[in-house]
Amino acid sequence: MPIVNRIAEFHAEMTEWRRDLHAHPELSMHETRTSAMVQAKLREFGVDEIITGMAETGVVGVIRGRKGNSDRAIGLRADMDALPIQEETGLPHASTSPGVMHACGHDGHTTMLLGAAKYLAETRNFDGTAYVIFQPAEEFEAGADKMVKDGLFDRCPMEMVFGLHNWPQAPAGTFLWRTGPVMAAVAWFDIVITGKGSHGAFPHQGIDPIVVAAQIVGALQTIVSRTIEPIEGGVVSVGHISGGEAYNILPERVLMKGTARWFKPAVGDAIEAGVRRLATGIAASFGASAEVSFRRHAPATVNDADATDIAVTAARTVSSDARVLSMTAPTMGGEDFAYMLEAKQGSYLMLGGGRGPDEPLLHHPRYDFNDEILPVGASWWATLAEQMLAGKG
Ligand SMILES: [Zn+2]
Ligand SMILES: [Zn+2]
């Protein structure tokens, strides 16, 4: 792969960082060790400034180019958090924290951006400023939104911001890009159904919230199929139901949790209204009640056309033209980088990491970031900065 030669030289070093991060995963808003490691590396690379405390564990490294001192600037963003999953890879660098795992490859994203930072701080072959942004809490709690609210773009004025996600289902080293929506808006919802507890043999003496929950699960599936225009994308999934303990006791309460995805804000509004209307209406019709909490985690991730051109040009420089592919459709996956793209022009690409048809997918207990692509992603970020801030030479 025609990656940046100097970056290829520290591939082994990057692999060590990545495996160290992988062995020590931290959940959203708990990335203290990771944040300290990132800060230590940036200090070692000799970046001009390190901004800490943004979104608590967030870190921004400031690197100024040596080709001039224009006020042009670019932002490169990685995420640092892991997931509440018990790792099953059996690898020597597997998680040392029970129940916590880097199953989305954010260890790889952090490492690739550190690789780019090391190279950019060493070469400074650009005119202006490169901000390397390490954000917490991509999976939960919308760390990108927190960083924007903590003044990321005021303290670090930049023209554009770029992110990338590894993509196990695409061959290693390929880039996937798309203009416009690339990932869906995400919401989490909880529905608490309250009935009246009773003996399983005497259901007429209570109001069974389990039967109510069953009606609601089925009805929620009609929101997208019957109330959203068929050509629009949307999904409602119930991922958790709990209530009751015993064979013969009908509980008082049932808890349901789920997620909804969409692209257009109007579709999101219709889905939220539908979840509320069906849950409360169905519960009421049984004499029970339902409390609905519908929380929007991230808007849709929408790529700017000009920024995407710049991102794709850098990808073609790093990989060959044949390995930079346009995505035919967006994915229903979600990404809180959407908040940065709402506030700033930018683009978000996928970088293939697949080693074959059996590659475990993201969020799988046997997933492991493919270290082969570390120099590819690092080269893409470094090339983006050098090309966008090329200056006059
Ligand atoms: Zn994830
Ligand atoms: Zn992720």
Image (cartoon, rainbow, N blue to C red):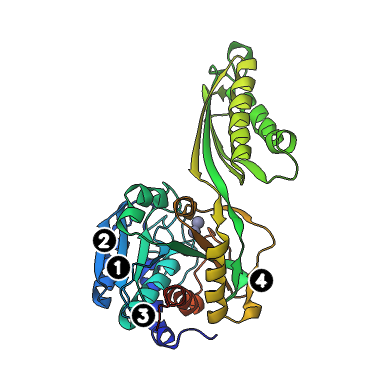
Quarter of the image holding residue 183?
bottom right
Indicate which disc residue 119 carries: 3
| Disc nearest the viewer among 1 and 4 | 1
Q: Which residue is mark 4?
A: 357
Local SS, label 3: helix
Residue displayed at 28% across by 58% down: 32
| Disc nearest the viewer among 3 and 1 | 1
Q: Disc 1 to disc 4, how far (Cα)?
A: 40 Å
How packed mark 2 is, by other alpha carbons closer than 10 Å (few <14, some 14-19, many 20 or more), is some
Q: Disc 3 to disc 1, how far (Cα)?
A: 13 Å
Q: Amino acid at mark 3?
A: Tyr
Q: Which residue is mark 1?
A: 62
As rendered, which of 19 and 205 lies closer to the eye? 19
Above or below for 238 versus 251: below
Q: Amino acid at mark 2?
A: Ile
The answer to whether marks 1 and 4 mark residues whose Cβ atoms lie closer than 8 Å is no
| Disc nearest the viewer among 3 and 4 | 3
Could you tell me which quadrant the C terminus lies in? bottom left
How packed mark 1 is, by other alpha carbons closer than 10 Å (few <14, some 14-19, many 20 or more), is many
Quarter of the image holding residue 212?
top right
Residue displayed at 34% across by 83% down: 123
Quarter of the image holding residue 129?
bottom left
Q: Which residue is mark 2?
A: 51
How packed mark 3 is, by other alpha carbons closer than 10 Å (few <14, some 14-19, many 20 or more), is many
Q: Disc 3 to disc 4, how far (Cα)?
A: 33 Å
Q: Disc 3 to disc 2, how far (Cα)?
A: 19 Å
Left or right for 190, reference 95 = right
Disc 1 residue: CB within 8 Å of ligand 2 = no
Q: Please report whichever mark, 3 or 4, sits nearer to the chain's N-terminal start.
A: 3
